[in-house]
Amino acid sequence: MNVPVYLDNNATTPMDPRVLEDMLPYFTQKFGNAASRNHSFGWVAEEAVDHARSWVARLIGAADSEIIFTSGATEADNLAIKGVFEMYRNKGNHIVTCATEHKAVLDTCKHIEKLGGTVTYLPVKEDGLIDPDELERSITDKTILVAIMYGNNETGVIQPVAEIAGIAHRHGVLFFTDATQAVGKIPIDVNTDGIDLMAFSAHKMYGPKGIGALYIRRKNPRVKITAQIDGGSHERGMRSGTLNVPGIVGFGRACELCSVEMNEEAIRLSALRDKLENALTEIEETYVNGSRQHRLPHVSNIAFKYTEGEGLIMTMKGLAVSSGSACTSASLEPSHVLKSLGLSDDLAHSSIRFALGRFTTEEEIDFAIGQVKKAVDNQRTLSPVWELFKEGITSQIYIK
């Protein structure tokens, strides 16, 4: 077993060696620009892009022409939200989203507000799920987009996407979902789910960093967006810029592997996650954050009451885990996702995210269990608050 053990696969995943193998020729021998139509170097690159686009589309039940390549999910989020807002502004200026969205969506919505748009930020229940009735009540005649994440990056909670899409469509509103953590982990079909736009990224599914995609529905309804990057009319005029051919090749191969291995992998990972979770929740005053019924198979977010998460991480020798989203790890503020679930600042700060992956082994899970238990015991032994709690004095210090 290699140490440190990596259990932060929601931040990024290691590239699958089979993906890298397919990419390598496109850095050297097959280095052409996919937009070069006058010689074989360009044709070879274009053919590789077309092949990869087909696999990306196939994984989510889309048509090839509905896939727009971007630099990642953050760009895809921006392109979807800003692009819809600008294109449909004559119809309305209201967007509905959720308080537990990734910052790429929340910050983009804040930008929309600066442009004169209005945004409703739906709360979630204690289990991390939105209330569909509250969503329906929030839609007005000015609403043009509902933007709700598929699977949460911190808790793994899966929203009722098909139901949300149905509500949006009953009101003539488009539905966008950031499915970065869900694509490649669970089966997704954009038609069955009623998704109009969807963002996702290769590096969350054992592909390369720096390449993502935005799915844009072409019929029933035909969705239009305004480009956010101009200069060359690449990607059907929606995203200009020289295509990242090696990255796209890797993205396609990663999607191909997920389409074959995803279901078996989900069964294995959920069993390992449950083993980890069951062992750690044997620790006194320990709780799983978010729904345990509606969630991704590889994620567990656990609060260790009367500890401090960053301190725990420092104490867990040889274990790579996270106290929240990688995109906000520099912040000292408690997770906005966990706060939205109703956790106190202290309890949110005591929470650790465990995200398993394709290369996680049972031996590594056993190692992680031992390290976490030692770290929790060590912190509590040194904590006067824990000592008071054990004496029955401070039972109300933490509120969940």
Image: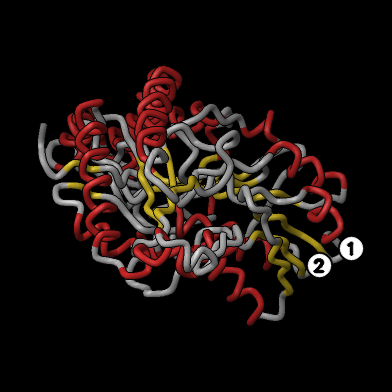
Dot 2 corresponds to which residue? 92
Which one is earlier in the sequence, the residue at label 2 or at label 1? Answer: 2
Which of label 2 and label 1 is nearer to you?
1
Residue drawn at the location 37% of the way across and 69% of the way down: 385
Q: Left of 62 or right of it: where is 117? A: right
Q: Position of residue 375 (x, y in %)?
A: 23, 52
The foreground one among 324 and 252 is: 324
Residue drawn at the location 83% of the way across and 59% of the way down: 139
Q: Secondary structure at mark 2?
A: loop
Q: Is residue 111 above or below residue 3?
A: below
Dot 1 corresponds to which residue? 141
Please give the count of numbered marks on the rendered protein. Answer: 2
The amino acid type found where label 1 is placed reads Asp
Identify the disc placed on residue 383: none
Q: For label 2, count other residues whose C-alpha is less than 10 Å away and answer few (under 14), some (14-19) or many (20+).
A: some
The amino acid type found where label 2 is placed reads Gly
Circles 2 and 1: CB atoms closer than 8 Å: yes
Residue drawn at the location 61% of the way across and 50% of the way down: 128
Q: Position of residue 384 (x, y in %)?
A: 32, 70
Q: Is residue 159 visible?
A: yes
The foreground one among 212 and 127 is: 127
Q: Is residue 154 above or below residue 42?
A: below
Q: Secondary structure at mark 1?
A: loop
**Disc 2 from disc 1: Cα separation:** 7 Å
> Image quarter for residue 258?
top left
